[in-house]
């Protein structure tokens, strides 16, 4: 079957390697698989505005940066529809209808809302829009009748919430909307890439990211500064793999091919890990290997990025065109939604008005 795909990113800043292994490379795979009829790539600016009402200028700049990152990674605007959330008004209309299908308690219990709440530090000033954001995400997905949504493991509650809302809608008003499924990264580590500081997640607001746009010099500096294991003072001491970002990045990025190319003393990552655990291998050697692995993967992305960056006008053109196509698709669904809800008053035959 020809699948419809939806992916979304908040424009929190330039995209980092967590985004890349967590979802971008999966999207490129889906795009090029020939199995998807439509792929919608949404830049969720409205969602980012919920908790950053004072950063419009920053968000505005980041929208273009995200689109540049998409293209640099291999998403092709001829094949995938890039669009900006705020420009598709139907998303907000459907959010509004969906809000009646959930309860406040249900939203407060949503695991993603709970964990985000503790990070955002709203205290007693939780914006109403924040509690409603799982509903808005459900609308993002349902508006395009997406069959597949690219997600990280920790975002699965988002999908669950969407499926519940869609089911409720279809039960109340008739079978109009599609229950989506998740497409997860191929390896578990790609769902939770740690930050360079060892924090559990790489995140723009934590300042612990390796960006797709980082220069080779900066990449090297960031890798060399990673604190792998503060208790291990000497090379011959055994090393620990737990909470070690260097090995997490190798897990995510490296196969046998890279060993042949950059570290032929070992056949694969398992062998390198064994040696590291026993002791006798120098951190710098592993970090240099990681640098080569990442550089080989990221350098083509960075050079494409540098070319794309020069023509922001072209990028806005792509986003404008994509937003128009997305709006047209959304308008069709919303017509069906209004009809199902019997609020399509003026689409009736003229005879009703005489
Ligand atoms: N919450 C996602 C993020 O933080 C962005 C997003 C908004 C999204 N709506 C979505 C992702 C719908 C998938 C589906 O990056």
Image: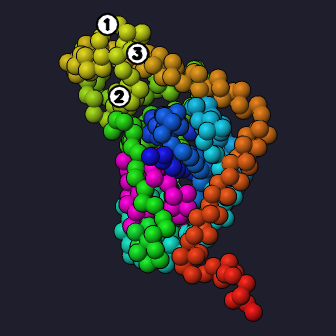
Q: Nearer the viewer, residue 17 or 308?
A: 308
Residue at left 76%, top 43%?
Answer: 317
Marks 3 and 1, Cα distance to the nearest angstrom?
12 Å
Q: Which residue is mark 2?
A: 251
Local SS, label 1: loop
Marks 2 and 3, Cα distance to the nearest angstrom?
12 Å
Q: Give the dominant element type of the magenta stretch: helix, strand or loop.
A: helix
Residue 105: image location, x then y, percent: 39, 76
Quadrant hosting residue 279: top left
Which residue is most to the right? 313
Quadrant hosting residue 46: bottom right
Residue 43 visible at all: yes
Quadrant hosting residue 273: top left
Q: Is residue 182 magenta?
A: no
Q: Which residue is mark 3?
A: 258
Residue at left 48%, top 34%?
Answer: 33
Marks 2 and 1, Cα distance to the nearest angstrom?
18 Å
Disc 2 crowd, CA 10 A, few/some/many (<14, 14-19, 20+): some
The number of numbered discs placed on residues in the rendered structure image is 3
Q: Which residue is mark 1?
A: 265
Which residue is most to the left? 278
Residue 259: image location, x then y, percent: 37, 13
Q: Depth-wise, is mark 3 or mark 1 nearer the camera?
A: 3
Task: Give the answer, above or below, for where 240 lies relative to 340.
Answer: above
Residue 306: image location, x then y, percent: 69, 27
The disc, 3 or 1, on the residue closer to the chain's N-terminal end is 3
């Amino acid at each position: 079957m020809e699948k419809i795909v939806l992916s979304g990113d908040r424009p929190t800043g330039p995209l980092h390697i967590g985004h890349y292994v967590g979802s971008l490379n999966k999207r490129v795979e889906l795009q090029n698989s020939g199995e998807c009829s439509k792929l919608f790539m949404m830049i969720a600016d409205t969602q980012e505005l919920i908790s950053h009402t004072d950063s419009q200028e920053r968000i505005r700049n980041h929208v273009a940066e995200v689109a540049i990152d998409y293209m640099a990674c291999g998403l092709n605007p001829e094949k995938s529809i890039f669009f900006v959330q705020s420009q598709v008004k139907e998303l907000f209309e459907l959010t509004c209808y969906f809000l009646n299908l959930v309860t406040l308690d249900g939203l407060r219990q949503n695991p993603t809302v709970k964990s985000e709440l503790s990070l955002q530090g709203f205290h007693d000033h939780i914006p109403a829009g924040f509690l409603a954001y799982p509903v808005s995400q459900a609308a993002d997905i349902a508006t395009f009748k997406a069959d597949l949504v690219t997600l990280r493991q920790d975002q699965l509650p988002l999908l669950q919430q969407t499926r519940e809302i869609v089911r409720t809608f279809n039960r109340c008003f008739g079978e109009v909307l599609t229950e989506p499924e998740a497409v997860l990264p191929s390896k578990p580590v790609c769902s939770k890439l740690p930050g360079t500081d060892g924090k559990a997640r790489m995140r723009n607001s934590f300042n612990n990211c390796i960006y797709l746009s980082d220069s080779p010099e900066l990449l090297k500096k960031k890798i060399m500064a990673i604190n792998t294991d503060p208790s291990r003072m000497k090379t011959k001491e055994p090393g620990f793999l737990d909470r070690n970002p260097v090995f997490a990045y190798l897990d995510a990025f490296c196969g046998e091919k890279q060993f042949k190319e950059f570290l032929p003393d070992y056949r694969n990552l398992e062998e390198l890990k064994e040696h590291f655990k026993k002791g006798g291998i120098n951190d710098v050697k592993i970090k240099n290997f990681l640098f080569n692995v990442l550089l080989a993967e990221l350098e083509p992305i960075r050079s494409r990025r540098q070319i794309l960056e020069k023509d922001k006008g072209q990028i806005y053109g792509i986003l404008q065109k994509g937003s128009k196509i997305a709006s047209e698709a959304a308008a069709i669904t919303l017509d069906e939604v209004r009809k199902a809800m019997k609020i399509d008053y003026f689409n009736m035959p003229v005879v009703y008005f005489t």
